[in-house]
């Protein structure tokens, strides 16, 4: 009798198929949750004179439509997401988009910005290597600020939901010693989302 083998969840294929079949980035990118993220980030950018932004995980572009980014590069593991954003913002010359694969990305100070954002993405990266590499790539942009919007938990255990894997994000961030956490902002709508903001600054 052969041993049952569980196939690992392919998060990249999941999001590729989701957008290709007309799906969205989910409830977190719409309604009051999207408004909350936009309020926090737009205020932060104004207060800190942010000119350029790189985003890891641009999704379907709905959250992006609420942001006041002056110069923007959006990356996403789903090429169908990039297609959506390229079409939606075709006439907006302040925005650029590229498909991102953590296993085929090497940034040696070419991609840089004042701010890097990663919203509702990290806990959806179910592959352990890709998770660590995505964090490395986020900090490779040498931004003055890094703004993460994710679940803050003390566990590296898989969730019962296949699309989510919780990790002890604060412990993982200790690896980036050039950066310090300067602020956390708790979720405003806790009945709808368990994600909060972590803001890091380069010193």
Image (cartoon, rainbow, N blue to C red):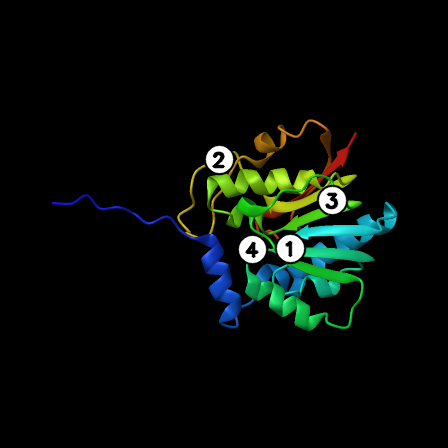
Q: Nearer the viewer, residue 109 or 185?
A: 109
Q: Which mark is residue 155?
A: 2
User: Disc 3 and disc 2: Cα gap in Å?
Assistant: 34 Å
Residue 26 shows in this picture:
no
Nearer the viewer's eye, disc 3 or disc 2?
A: 3
User: Disc 3 and disc 4: Cα gap in Å?
Assistant: 19 Å
In primary-sequence order, the first of circles 4 and 2 is: 4
Nearer the viewer's eye, disc 1 or disc 2?
A: 1
Question: Mark 4 highlights which residue?
Answer: 77
Horizontal side of residue 109 vs 4, given as left or right: right
Vertical placement of residue 83 versus 12, above or below: below
Per the image, label 4 sits on a secondary structure element best described as loop
- Residue 66 in the image, given as x and y percentages of width and height: 74, 63
- Residue 130 in the image, given as x and y percentages of width and height: 52, 43
Residue at image position (40%, 51%) is 9
Nearer the viewer's eye, disc 4 or disc 2?
A: 4
Q: Which mark is residue 110?
A: 3
In primary-sequence order, the first of circles 1 and 2 is: 1
Tell me whether the residue at label 3 lies in contact with that at label 2, contact meaning CB atoms closer than 8 angstroms: no
Tell me whether the residue at label 3 lies in contact with that at label 4, contact meaning CB atoms closer than 8 angstroms: no
């Amino acid at each position: 009798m052969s041993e049952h083998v569980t196939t690992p969840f392919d998060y990249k294929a999941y999001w590729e198929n989701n957008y290709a079949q007309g799906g969205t980035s989910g409830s977190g990118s719409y309604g009051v949750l999207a408004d909350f993220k936009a309020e926090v980030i737009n205020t932060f950018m104004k207060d800190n004179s942010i000119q350029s932004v790189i985003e890891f995980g641009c999704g379907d572009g709905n959250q992006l439509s609420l942001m006041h980014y002056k110069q923007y590069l959006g990356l996403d593991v789903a090429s169908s997401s990039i297609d959506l954003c390229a079409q939606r913002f075709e006439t907006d010359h302040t925005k650029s988009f590229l498909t991102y694969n953590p296993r085929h990305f090497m940034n040696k100070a070419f991609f840089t910005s004042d701010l890097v954002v990663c919203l509702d993405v990290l806990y959806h990266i179910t592959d352990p290597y890709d998770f660590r590499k995505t964090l490395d790539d986020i900090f490779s942009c040498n931004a003055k600020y890094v703004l993460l919007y994710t679940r803050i938990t003390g566990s590296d255990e898989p969730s019962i939901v296949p699309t989510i894997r919780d990790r002890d994000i604060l412990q993982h961030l200790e690896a980036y010693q050039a950066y310090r956490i300067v602020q956390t902002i708790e979720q405003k709508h806790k009945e709808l989302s368990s994600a909060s903001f972590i803001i890091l600054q380069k010193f």
